[in-house]
Amino acid sequence: MTAPLLAALDPQSAFVQACYIVAFSLFILGIRRGTHPTTAKQGNLIAATGMVIAVATTLALKGIGNWGLIAIGMGGGAIVGVVASRRVQMTAMPQMVALYNGVGGGAVALIAWGEFRHFLALGEAIPLDTFVPILFSMVLGSVSFWGSNIAFGKLQGLIPGQPVKVPGQQVLNGLLLVGIVTVCIVLGFDHDSGPSQGLFIAVLIAAALLGNLFVLPIGGADMPVVISLLNAFTGLSAAAAGIELDNTALIVAGTLVGSSGTILTLAMATAMNRSVPNILFAGFGALPTGAAEAEERPVTSIGAQDAAIKLAYADSVVIVPGYGMAVAQAQHAVKEMANELEKRGVDVAYAIHPVAGRMPGHMNVLLAEADVPYEELKEMDDINPEMPHTDVAVVIGANDVTNPAAKDDPNSPIAGMPIIEVDEAQQVIVIKRSLSPGFAGIDNDLFYNEKTSMLFSDAKQAAADIAAEIENL
């Protein structure tokens, strides 16, 4: 199918470069506006406008053809994206992020393969400064695609969330990595001959194996960090694809994603007081196997009415949300409970741990959906000094990020991890279905603290019952 007359722009023309500059400027502005809940929606629209400009400009370049395939791809992708995004539950958002990130990495790997085949079909020698980005984007894109699929499977429950290891796991990963690098070097010296295509396919397969084996041994508790790291991989591979395609907008967009993903990965590792290599290779973060593993110690159990009385007559309350709140979809009920407390003059704040939930910012997204004012969300470093002066801390589904063992037990697997220090509050109410351990697979000493009262219930039902009891006081 021949290209329409519109597709006649010179890729090196000043107009095309100006369009790309406008596009990536909108990307940056969109990211900037996305740093606050009140402007995040606007930021998404601004960045999306930049992407429309970038795509439209690229489609208008000389040499663009196969318009039928392009239309099918864009139309099909748009339909799947819109339907999936509208239907996905907030609790499944981490899985969706992992899946979408993997799709991006897979697309980059296919672009690299297509560019390689294109040069071979033309019988042209591939310049080394083009071939190196092709290899780089292909390897990282493939690792990101397959690794993200494993992350999706773990979060979705399709694959066991606990670390899955094979004998000699790290040695095998190391051999795969060395093999990939070695073959890439060989291809760098001779990538225009017939056998190079077989070697290229071998690298593609090895990268796919590495992506799978790289994520399988990592436990569910560390998935937020893994998703962030794979996101950085996808960004860097996209930037390399931009270099091989000589596309300015793709280079900048990929660099933005790669750098932000890297920064976020390091920040989350710091929040867990662990190094990135420890997260990737320690096999930590196993899913709990059940409440039976929890140590049998006495706890104080209360009902919704008792909890309502404790909260209604407090001066200050700090709510600490976790993944349990997301699973129960309790954010709106929690907001109603907070509203009833604020009507009585109680000062309410929300303490957000950097790695609460299953993806960066998971709790912020849920609470924003429930129209919780951004000003009431407090980061861990800001809220901890206030905990000794807090009358009641309410823990809703948060487990490992409130476990005092992190600071009190040097032998604990989470020793040294910064936590929300709810045990410093005057009273603690924990809303949880059972005493089962969290994603780290260890018992939570907070449950047995003399200041702690356990409300065993679904988080949504418990919050709604407490709100009703407060209203009736």
Image (tube, helix red, strand yellow):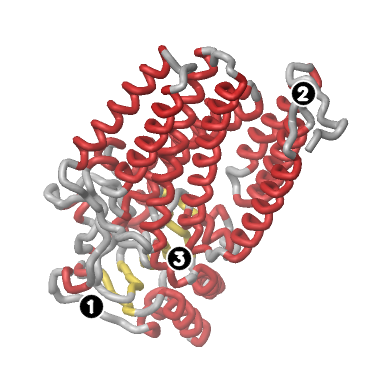
Residue bearing mark 1: 300
Farthest-out residue, right: 5
Under mark 1, the amino acid is Thr
The label shown at residue 16 is 2
Spatial CA distance of label 2 from label 1 is: 68 Å
Q: Earlier in the sequence, mark 2 or mark 3?
A: 2
The label shown at residue 326 is 3
Under mark 2, the amino acid is Val
Category of crowding for the residue at label 2, using alpha-carbon neighbours closer than 10 angstroms: few (below 14), some (14–19), many (at least 20): many
Q: Nearer the viewer, mark 3 or mark 1?
A: 3
The residue that appears at 56% across and 73% down in the rendered structure is 343
Q: CB of mark 2 within 8 Å of CB of mark 1?
A: no
SS type, badge 2:
helix
Under mark 3, the amino acid is Ala
Spatial CA distance of label 2 from label 3 is: 45 Å
The residue that appears at 51% across and 34% down in the rendered structure is 235
Where residue 345 appears, as percent x and y from the top left, is 52, 69
| Residue 347 against residue 355 in the figure, above or below | below
Where residue 254 appears, as percent x and y from the top left, is 56, 31
Would you say 245 lies left or right of 178 here?
right
SS type, badge 1:
loop
